[in-house]
Image (cartoon, rainbow, N blue to C red):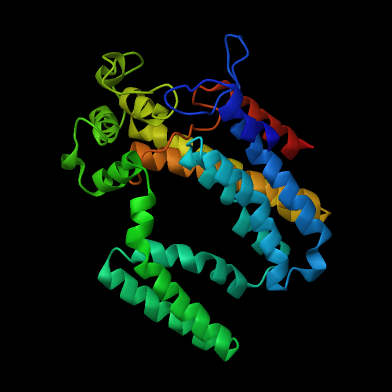
Amino acid sequence: MLILIFVPFFFDTIAGTYRWINIGLPVGVQPSEFAKWIIVVALARYLSDHNLQIKRFTTILFPIFIALVPAIIILQQPDLGTAIILLTPILPMLYWVGARPFHLFILVAPLLSIATAFHTISFTVWAILMGSVLYLTKPRLFFGVMFYFGNIFLGLLSPFLWNSLRPYQQKRILTLFNPELDPLGAAYQTIQSKVAIGSGGFFGKGLGSGTQTHLKFLPVQESDFIVSVIGEEFGFITISIMLIIFSLFLLKIVKLAFLAKERFPGLVLIGIGTIFMAHVFVNTAMSTGMIPVKGLPLPFISAGGSFLLSCFIMIGLIIK
């Protein structure tokens, strides 16, 4: 965590961000990539040591703090994608260790209140669903009332939260729903990525025959948009096979977690599996225009020394 704090003060910016440690070597180091599995190990240790009290809501607040502090630091670099990835293992690991589903619902509810507040019908449906959950779980009256109206109030604050986003983040979200708003700016990467995948068809154009990639229309094709390169040159069939292999890999991790004789290694496996799954989902989804563009590479395929090394470390933890 100290390294993450010191990066903006002692190292120069690269592409407008403070993410890299450059000490004169040909390859820089991105410490936030190693924070992913370190956070998983820290969460697993805490949860395995406090599993008897995990039914209490106050016990599950500290794991959130463990992941939230480095996530906030990384968010200031700025690196929203990695900050989100650091938070993704929390809920699966809490559920795995036996936390109550209602407590997990309490954690997720504020995010859903904010996300649905921009659409009247969605927010209404969410308010009804939230009330139904409270009716079925029957918490204390005071807590239920405060929780319900607190989330409604949080939803009403969404415009202020929207204004707190950086302009480029707002553009990415807006162009997700309407790429024509900025086809040569924020939506350019998404449009070129979809063109590359679509032009590849089922079987692709062949190795080295992709026009979008080799004519440099597609930016950061070696890392963030590697799926687009695969789609254009090898087709939809190859992307499908790749996703099936990743799915089998993740299922194997979950199976190993079930077979783990102790709680700590099982939690580490679930956390690592969640990180891999999040990377695969986000990288594939942003390449196809399903979500805003985030600089998250595809495990074992995208270029990137720090992330690739971090992936191999996580594989070592799985094997161990």
Q: Is residue 247 visible?
A: no
Q: Position of residue 19 (x, y in %)?
A: 54, 28
Query: Would you say 5 lies left or right of 193 here?
Result: right
Q: Quadrant of the C terminus?
A: top right
Q: Is residue 97 visible?
A: yes
Question: Residue at position x 41%, y 39% from top?
Answer: 284
Name of the residue lying farthest toward the bottom? 141
Residue nearest the observer in this picture, 277 or 158: 158
Query: Would you say 288 lies left or right of 297 here?
Result: left
Write down the quadrant of residue 292 in the picture: top left
Q: Is residue 118 above or below residue 136?
A: above
Residue nearest the observer in this picture, 108 or 206: 108
Q: Position of residue 137 (x, y in %)?
A: 57, 84
Q: Quadrant of the N terminus?
A: top right
Q: Is residue 69 above or below residue 197?
A: below
Q: Is residue 247 above or below residue 310?
A: below
Question: Residue at position x 26%, y 14% from top?
Answer: 215
Query: Would you say 250 lies left or right of 201 here?
Result: right
Query: Would you say 319 lies left or right of 200 here?
Result: right
Q: Position of residue 8 (x, y in %)?
A: 56, 29
Q: Is residue 210 above or below residue 18?
A: above
Question: Residue at position x 63%, y 30% from top?
Answer: 6
Name of the residue lying farthest toward the left? 180
Name of the residue lying farthest toward the front? 9
Write down the quadrant of residue 31 in the picture: top right
Write down the quadrant of residue 234 in the picture: top left
User: How many numbered discs, if any?
Assistant: 0
Q: Position of residue 174 (x, y in %)?
A: 26, 47
